[in-house]
Amino acid sequence: MGYLVLARKYRPQKFEDVVKQEHITKALANALISGRLAHAILLSGPRGTGKTSIARILAKCVNCESGPTAAPCNSCRSCKEITSGHAADVFEIDGASNNKVENVRELRENANYMPAHSPYKIYIIDEVHMLSDSAFNALLKILEEPPAHVKFFFATTDPNKIPITILSRCQRHDCRRVDVDSIIKHMALLCEKESIDISPEALTIIAREADGSIRDALSLLNLIITSTTDRIGTEQIVDILGGLDRQSLFDVSQAVFDQDAGKIIEIIARLYDRGQNMIKLFSELLEHFRNLLVIKIDGSTGTLCDVSEFELNAMREQVKNIPQIYIHQILDVLFKEEYTIRQSSAPKLAVEMAFIRVIQIRPALSIETLIEKIDILQKGLTEKPPAESVSYPEQPPQTFGDDSKPAPAPQNQIPPNVTPDLTPNIIPDARDYQPPGAENEPPVAEVKEDNPTPIYEDAPRMNRQKVQIKDEPIEKSWEKILTTVANENPALAACFSDSQLKKISDNQLEVLFKTKQFNIKYANRDNHPSIIQNACSQYFGNAIQVSLSGRQAKSKSGMAQKKEVKTLENETLNHPLVEDAMKIFNGKIVEIKIL
Ligand SMILES: [Zn+2]
């Protein structure tokens, strides 16, 4: 026998030899054993996955002298004839070149005659979807009432083009695309039998180039074997096939994780010089990063990645210390760049730019880390004694015991309303307030105790009850109240760092903010007034009215308003909460809206 290419030499001769189509071979074997094999069988699936091989083995199973059997002897006359391709009773027809109605009519006439020496006449029609409509109609007639001695085995890569009338009369089996690892193992086995010295990396490149087709993989392997006499390594494969060496993909991903733009550009240049198609390179890199993400998500099995075990381990190692969310960010950028690269007249440049954008990503913190940081921040706020930051050294400590000497009521106080609800309900407008005259806060001493203007006052004066006086300094009381507030809303407590408990009389508390309009506004938002109210009531054991005071607006002129807005913006920018938020989220301020 002359030289046979690998694909022919190692064509499967029994069901066990078929790679990765066990779901079909088992079903067919069971049908044969139970004597329920259909008279028309359709095998569909991508090219090179074993459809025709299965059809031929099935023909042997049916016509073997020891058959019907699931394990043909491969030594009887029928088996030998089928193996050699010259069987008298097995007709292999190429549907693409015999697609006319005349061809099918001829087949029908021939089918009426009994087989020469086998139990069945078998028609294997490859690429059956290529038949013309009239040919399908002619085929339908014989499929409707086939002679008992006839079997049809059809193979197709495009079952959707087959009329439903034909499909409904066939038992259909779908061949799967063969995964890279299975192709590699199959090739490694053949290389061992043929004493071919080839590296696992080289087999990986061939398997990926084959794109799920065993036949293509063996054809490529054949090409390489005949092209070189040395040990086959990655370089020979890349030279012969012009493919991409897989190590380069790992080098690029490592350079991305190291944020080494120079290294990436160097690798891209090397591959470009070697003749690598840049669009294909980018697609491979996209898939590589997708695999890295999948392995990060499900590192234990890696069944969702069509790569060899060898690469799987390398990928696991590479992403071991890389946060999942960072790989996600990288993929996001790469996907956004894909269209540009495909459309670009300078794809190399486009790929380089895409990766420079990837390098510029600042790795995001995981949700767990963020929650941890927020917890620490909240804890810090809760533990921080707010009274310290609002103490006015110029003023002597005021105690709640000093009930007989109430501080003078603020001037221009808004008259109390009679709403029974204790929740303060006056929302101030930022423009009602006079911003501090300078960019910096005015000194504490400038706050005139006798001249505060109420920002809002809790109005209800019903159910007046005297506050139960606590025997502790007013700062201490305020600190405890703010601790209660912090438990419910740490940010709100932080905003009171700018405040001071000024006085207490009857069932009313007065809180004076120093200068920060931001804080006053924040304290008035949403349900914040009721949180403060409840904390005070809880502390004193009675329903307490709380009034928040700031400084009165002096002017509402255009200039003053602009100045006021500017001051509010400065206060916002310098506010510790905003600074903390920027630090945690690695953020920046894009816009400040005055509400
Ligand atoms: Zn046999």
Image (cartoon, rainbow, N blue to C red):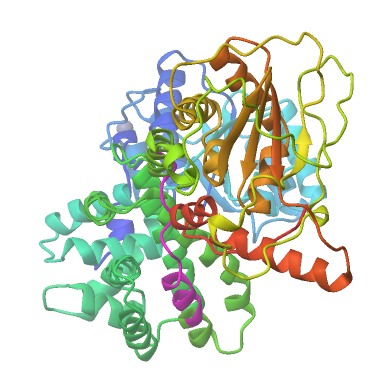
Q: In this view, does 190 lie to the left or right of 207?
A: left
Viewer-side residue, 420 vs 8: 420
| 72 up-or-down from 410: above or below | above
When asked about the image quadrant of residue 211, the answer is: bottom left
How many tags in the picture? 0
Q: Quarter of the picture for ligand 1?
A: top left
Q: Does the magenta stretch include residue 206?
A: no
Q: In this view, does 379 lie to the left or right of 119?
A: left
Q: In this view, does 173 lie to the left or right of 145?
A: left
- Residue at 67 percent of width and 39 percent of height: 523
Viewer-side residue, 265 vs 546: 546
- Residue at 46 percent of width and 30 percent of height: 479
Viewer-side residue, 411 vs 434: 411
Q: Quadrant of the N terminus?
A: bottom left
| 195 up-or-down from 106: above or below | below
When asked about the image quadrant of residue 338, the answer is: bottom right
In the rendered image, residue 45, in percent from the top left (x then y), is placed at 54, 45
When asked about the image quadrant of residue 33, the answer is: top left
Taking the view exactly as shown, the residue that stands out farthest to the front is: 404
Viewer-side residue, 47 vs 155: 47
- Residue at 76 percent of width and 23 percent of height: 423
In the rendered image, residue 460, in percent from the top left (x then y), is placed at 82, 19
In the rendered image, residue 485, in percent from the top left (x then y), is placed at 54, 28
From where the camera sits, is residue 44 visible? no
| 533 up-or-down from 446: above or below | above
Stretch of the chain drawn in magenta: 353-368
In the rendered image, residue 73, in percent from the top left (x then y), is placed at 27, 31
| 244 up-or-down from 430: above or below | below
